[in-house]
Image: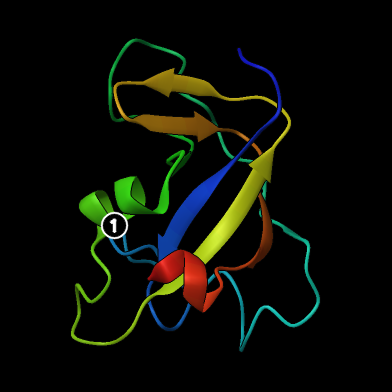
Amino acid sequence: MSKPVEGFKIFTHDWRSPIQGGEPLLKGDLLYPPYELPTVPLDTSDNECGAGWNFTRTLVGAAKIARFWSNGRPAKMVVVHTPTCIERENKLRSANLTLVRECSQGEIQ
């Protein structure tokens, strides 16, 4: 496990996982951050992909995995924070993740 870290995660326009799909994690916008996501099981194996909240250290890294417009609609790009995480290849994952804020236009550009 590592020290607390800030990173980036991308969601679809309606707050779904761009890779896994599923139900929206939020309704509407991230109006009252921070927002703590539910705790999920964490795969602590050496696998690059595994169970947990997956995110990256950079927005570019997140875009390489999730794409900005994977479904033809703009994505939600979010700064996230976690108290502990594991790192595998170019991804991080944690059992707990907090959505801090949506990325600024400067960060996106």
Q: Residue at x 48, y 65 (%)?
A: 107
Quarter of the figure with residue 1: top right
Is residue 16 visible to us here?
no
Q: Position of residue 87 (x, y in %)?
A: 44, 21
Report the front residue among 70 and 59: 59
User: Is residue 22 left or right of 27 when viewed as pictured?
Assistant: left
Question: SS at mark 1?
Answer: helix
Q: What amino acid type should be assigned to the residue bearing mark 1? A: Ala
Q: Which residue is mark 1?
A: 63
Q: Position of residue 101 (x, y in %)?
A: 67, 66
Report the front residue among 85 and 22: 85
Q: Position of residue 102 (x, y in %)?
A: 59, 71
Q: Residue at x 61, y 89 (%)?
A: 28
Q: Is residue 88 above or below residue 15?
A: above
Q: Position of residue 30 (x, y in %)?
A: 67, 78
Quarter of the figure with residue 54: top left
Q: Check disc 1: other Cα within 10 Å, few if <14, some if 14-19, many if 20+.
A: some
Q: Residue at x 37, y 76 (%)?
A: 75
User: Is residue 72 left or right of 7 when viewed as pictured?
Assistant: left
